[in-house]
Image (tube, rainbow, N blue to C red):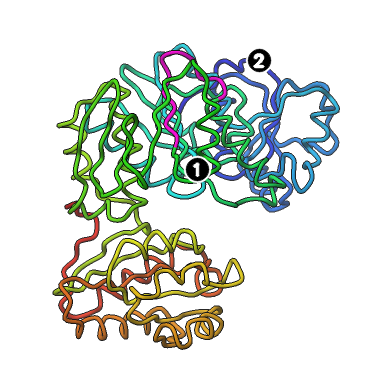
Amino acid sequence: MSAATRFKDRNVAVFGLARSGVACMEGLIAGGAQVHVWDDSESSVAEARKKGWPVTDLRQFDFSSLDSLVLSPGVPLTHPEPHWTVRRAQDAGVEIIGDTEVFLRQIAGSGARVVAITGTNGKSTTTALIGHVLSYGGLDAHTGGNIGTAVFLLPPPGDNTVYVLEFSSYQIDLTPGLKPDVGILMNLSPDHLDRHGTMENYAAVKAKIFAQQSAGDTAIVSLDDPWCAAIAETIGDGASLVRMSVEETLDTGVSAPEGVVHLRGSKEMSIDTNGMRSLRGRHNWQNACAAVSAAAALGIGQPAIEAALRSFPGLAHRMEEIGRAGQVVFINDSKATNTDAAAMALAAFDRIYWIAGGLAKSDGIESLSQFYDKIIHAYLIGEAAETFSEMLEGRVANTNCGTLENAVRLAASDAAQDGAEEVAVLLSPACASFDQYPDFEKRGEAFCDAVQMLDGVVTTKGKAA
């Protein structure tokens, strides 16, 4: 854990006692700050008191005595309306920051470098992939942020340290000092508009990842959606701009329209990702583009980058190959909780026995109709099963299976009869899990367990190509 010594003797309130808030509290205390913690959840406050944490009822507290308010990224900063702590801090002229801002101030001047990744979809896989490539290339790389490990749980900086951090839009909003050595914007589509109000506001927050970059920094920006392409045009003369595309081949930048990553510019290399099991599909080609260009910007050569890409095992529940039975491959994409994410998985295979359903996030799956000719049969589960069945009627053969276990059994049996060279039993639900499972991880684990119970399945989980 890092101690936030830059906040020594400062009066700091930490609101929100989830993972990142607790880790930041501990870092601030270790660094000598005067800390006050609070939460809207009575049970969280009671637990904090039980553990002896420095609990202060911020509802009764004089905010003018504070130097900083450290706000959990899950707490509304602007929309649908500012949280009460935000209003009180603003009225008192107190800065409002997140744990990522505290951490970046702490490591400033240490020699540690920062790679910051943001976007709507694919951030976590890209973050993990870049961390893997940098470690393979000999750097002291550590991944954290929105990917799951709170920044204050990462090791303090040492020689050759690179922090590879995933940033949500909420975290960017709370990190005014963000100035990454390498900043990456993967993609943008409507998301979290309840917290940002409009798509324009959402895109503007994401663009802040590049706002303070200067000479020697690198900005890697996708051109494959209009929002990102517009942001690329705003990158000034300071940072080196690397344009990125998997839709077209770029003369300058990084691109992989057919799965072969071509980096063109001050550094040049070509790496074929076809056949790398953990990098299937166009969205993973984009992840590879980001990793190749980030690693090259940090001085890693092609042999190490290529070997690292080939050895990347992938992330659990994200296009994760679980096992094989003859020509049938079983893919756990439980993290695909919306249609945009499911589309990425459906695009990656030619013949699909699709397991979908759960708690629908939107009106339906019509946006996935371009993939219907790839879907041999759909096996529907959960609350959305009946609605999805009606939408697929006459277009895709489907069965309302009720449970995931039933869906796996039926899909595996049908897929085994398919004579194609490779067919996929794909869990990519396009729905949240909460009607049947507490989270997408538990749903993915249930899928893995069901696959392992099948006869003749050879486990490939965690094994790279």
Q: Is residue 288 depicted above or below 444 in this figure? A: above
Q: Write down the quadrant of residue 356 in the picture.
A: bottom left
| Badge 1: residue crowd in 10 Å (few <14, some 14–19, many ≥20) | many
Identify the secondary structure beneath mark 2.
loop
Residue at image point 59% right, 40% down:
169
The answer to if 214 sits in the magenta stretch is: yes
Residue 130 seen in this snapshot? no
Q: Which residue is mark 2?
A: 9
Give the number of the disc on residue 119.
1
Amino acid carrying mark 1 in the image: Gly
| Mark earlier in primary sequence (1, 2) | 2
Amino acid type, label 2: Asp
Residue 257 or 151: which is nearer the viewer? Answer: 257
Q: Is residue 219 above or below residue 373?
A: above
Stretch in magenta = 211-221
Q: Is residue 378 magenta?
A: no
The location of residue 427, given as percent across then percent down, is: 37, 70
